[in-house]
Image (cartoon, rainbow, N blue to C red):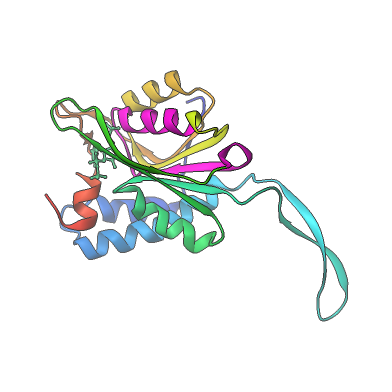
Amino acid sequence: MDGVTVIDHPLVQHKLTLMRRKETSTASFRRLLREISTLLCYEVTRDLDLTTMPIETPMEAMDAPILEGKKMVFASILRAGNGLLEGMLDLVPAARVAHIGMYRDHETLQPVEYYFKAPEDLGNRLVIVVDPMLATANSATAAMEKLKERGARNIRFLCLLAAPEGIQRFRDAHPDIPIFTASIDRGLNEKGYIMPGLGDAGDRMYGTK
Ligand code: PRP
Ligand code: URA
């Protein structure tokens, strides 16, 4: 599918299966999400530009590769996005962080925004937006609009599970933003949940209902 990368690394797929299982405890779900997010982070940053800087090893001087450009921004769509955020920050501790507070109204499936905080200069940075679930894509498309309003130009979206309906809607609304996901599931049920999915990601992370 154009603009969509499925991260099919065996470790990702194995951990995802453990996360999907209904018997998996809240503690295990959180730990697995943190572990899987470091692997996803590795893939979503695979093609970042490098430059070199002169350094001295204990043996001699060399021009060594480092990431080019300003520090990245990881933008978490709350609450569940924070599960991915933690592992991403383990790998890229210097990244800047944006928080987008948004929840889905269970009746209308429309996003309700309650918080937004992001670094000022989004236009000069790569912004990687994280949320485990892309279902109807109402939340993710609204989050992208908000980030673009604030100047973001170079954005990637990273999730764990995506529904085909959500991918279509997201790509129609934001064809410039590539999607990275560990799985494209079968589709949505009548309540807008991903099938077979893993249930409500936020509830499974935090033990709420
Ligand atoms: C979940 C998920 C996404 C959204 C996806 O969040 O983390 O943000 O639903 O659904 P959509 O693609 O149909 O918009 P939720 O609204 O349950 O909030 P939470 O993370 O606070 O639990
Ligand atoms: N949000 C979730 O947490 N799970 C779904 O299946 C759909 C939206």
Q: Residue at x 50, y 43 (%)?
A: 128
**Does the stretch in magenta take in 188?**
no
Residue range in magenta is: 121-147
User: Hey, which residue is sitting farthest top in the picture?
Assistant: 172
User: Which of the 4 image quarters holds residue 153?
Assistant: top right
Q: Residue at x 23, y 28 (%)?
A: 188
Count how many numbered circles sit on residues in the image.
Answer: 0
User: Hey, which residue is sitting farthest right in the picture?
Assistant: 60
Residue 113: x and y, percent?
29, 35
Please name whichever residue, 166 or 107, is drawn nearer the observer in this view of the structure: 107
Q: Is 55 placed left or right of 185 in the picture?
A: right
Q: Is 126 placed left or right of 37 in the picture?
A: right
Residue 86: x and y, percent?
41, 59
Please name whichever residue, 177 or 150, is drawn nearer the observer in this view of the structure: 150
Q: Residue at x 25, y 47 (%)?
A: 201
Q: Is 190 placed left or right of 5 in the picture?
A: left
Q: Quadrant of ligand 2?
A: top left
Does 185 appear above or below 59? above
Residue 3: x and y, percent?
51, 28
